[in-house]
């Protein structure tokens, strides 16, 4: 996924991707496939892999991304996804993984 590219993550963070993710999870809360891919996008955004290359002069901060998610109330939405789609192992597991990222200390 191109989102694993550090430069892409930086652009998405600056472009208010997390606000868009919040809005998508609110608007399409019952749509299993939209929720699935939105959670995967969020997972990739919070994943430390591809987080930045110091030599390039730009750095993507997982700590900043995590803080943005927490401030936007994404944890409540993630828990709702996990509960709503408990019968779908992929969605439930992705929601749990995202939750673990949100509660991890990236600083």
Image (cartoon, helix red, strand yellow):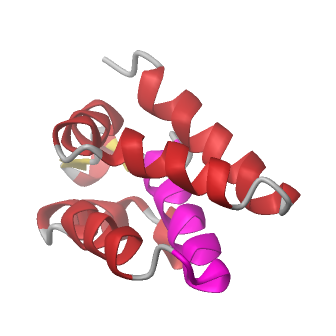
> Which residue is rendered at x = 44% and y = 56% of the image?
45
Image location of residue 50, percent across then percent down: 50, 52
Q: In this view, does 90 lie to the left or right of 33?
A: right
Q: Which of 21 and 106 is in front in this view?
A: 21
Q: Does the magenta stretch include residue 42?
A: yes
Q: In this view, does 86 lie to the left or right of 4?
A: right
Q: Nearer the viewer, residue 76 or 9?
A: 76
**Is 101 placed above or below 103 here?**
below
Q: In this view, does 3 lie to the left or right of 82?
A: left
Range covered by the magenta-colored residues: 30-47
> Which residue is rendered at x = 69% and y = 52% of the image?
94
Image location of residue 43, percent across then percent down: 55, 53
Q: Which of 105 and 24 is in front in this view?
A: 24
Main SS category, magenta section? helix
Q: Is residue 93 magenta?
A: no
Number of numbered labels in the structure image: 0
Image location of residue 33, percent across then percent down: 66, 84
Image location of residue 92, percent across then percent down: 74, 51
> Which residue is rendered at x = 77% and y = 53% of the image?
86
> Which residue is rendered at x = 39% and y = 39% of the image?
75
Please identify the quarter of the rendering in which residue 22 is found.
bottom left
């Amino acid at each position: 996924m191109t989102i694993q590219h550090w430069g892409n993550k930086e652009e998405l963070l600056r472009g208010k991707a997390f606000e868009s993710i919040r809005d998508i999870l609110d608007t399409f809360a019952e749509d299993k496939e939209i929720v699935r891919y939105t959670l995967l996008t969020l997972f990739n955004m919070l994943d430390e892999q591809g987080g930045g290359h110091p030599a390039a002069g730009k750095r993507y901060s997982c700590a900043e991304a995590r803080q943005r998610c927490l401030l936007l109330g994404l944890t409540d939405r993630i828990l709702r996804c996990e509960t709503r789609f408990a019968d779908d192992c992929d969605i439930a597991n992705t929601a749990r993984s995202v939750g673990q990222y949100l509660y991890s200390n990236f600083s």
